[in-house]
Amino acid sequence: MTLSTNIAMSRLVAQQRALEVAANNMANANTPGYKVERVLFSDWLSRQRNVDPPAGGRVVAYTQDRATWREDQAGTVTHTANPFDLALTGDGFFTVQTPQGPRLTRDGRFGPRPDGTLADGAGAAVLDANGRPIQLSPADTRITIAGDGTISSENGELGRIGVVRVTDRMRMTAEGNTNFRADAPTAPLPSPGIVQGAMEDSNVKPVVEMTRMMSELREFQLVTQFVQAEFDRQKDAIDKILSPRL
């Protein structure tokens, strides 16, 4: 392939990644606690050496898919009347114990396991302010959860749900659609603003994502047309060179 085709192909790969991210956002428009993803592109500069390039052509810029990041805006709080559904209105995360270790999440759809452990939909135990699983007994039938995370029943106070803030959000790695691994220290959030009987919706705006996906698709098609035109041009040139002269 020629240099121009290589440059176009780098953009084509990046556009494919942008389409995948937009499609994943659309697929999670109804996932509680999901944060919309965005793609960060940058230039990858190739400095031409030992060549005689045209003016301005000594540095060739390829398109590079540098990273993905998430928008932190809170989603809409929807009331469900389920006492174990919890929404965070503050800047924080619940902590759940997964097989890979503690993970952070904004998805507050919780419920008791058969043994009484409060857990998320995947069965990961919800941790309290001391990093221990929260345990409910069969006698605890009327559960109330205060804004600071304190859990109580008709038998008294049962514990306090741990909500933490990450000191450096740039060092959070997504695992799945709603869980994050924190590679930076976390600190307890004293006033998390928990709302019982509610959940935080995804912050995906379907109309915006659909418009973005259509725009990304048009750019993908434009670059594809360029690559095809360049291929046809090279093929036509080769045919003319190799065809017998009349």
Image (tube, rainbow, N blue to C red):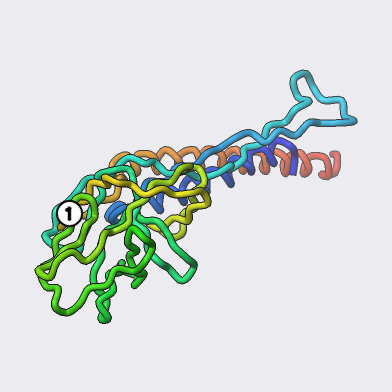
Quarter of the image where one finds residue 162: bottom left
Quadrant of res 226:
top right
Which residue is more in the foreground, 110 or 52? Answer: 110
Residue 82 picture location, percent across and down = 14, 63
Q: Is residue 28 visible?
A: no
Q: Position of residue 217 (x, y in %)?
A: 45, 43
Farthest residue in the right direction? 50
Which quarter of the image is occupied by the N terminus?
A: top right
> In the rendered image, which residue does mark 1 sit on?
146
The answer to whether residue 32 is above or below residue 214 is below
The x, y position of residue 155, in whole percent, is 12, 70
Type of residue at label 1?
Answer: Ala
Q: Secondary structure at mark 1?
A: loop
Q: Position of residue 116 (x, y in %)?
A: 25, 77
- Residue at left 49%, top 49%? 185
Of residues 232 and 182, the one nearer the viewer is: 182
Q: Is residue 18 above or below residue 126?
A: above
Please indicate whether residue 135 sits to the left or right of residue 82 in the image: right
Q: Residue furthest front?
A: 156
- Tell whether 154 sits left or right of 113: left
- Is residue 183 visible in this depiction of the protein? yes
Along the viewing direction, whichever of 47 and 131 lies nearer the viewer: 131
Q: Left or right? Give the position of 153 relative to 183.
A: left
> The C terminus appears in which quarter of the rendering?
top right
Q: Is residue 28 above or below residue 48?
A: below
Give neighbour class at mark 1: few <14, some 14-19, many 20+ (Cα, 10 Å): some
Could you say which is closer to the camera, residue 51 or residue 154?
A: 154
85 on left or right of 232: left
- Find residue 81 and report its image quarter: bottom left
Instruction: Give the residue drawn at x 45%, y 40%.
Output: 216
| Image label count | 1
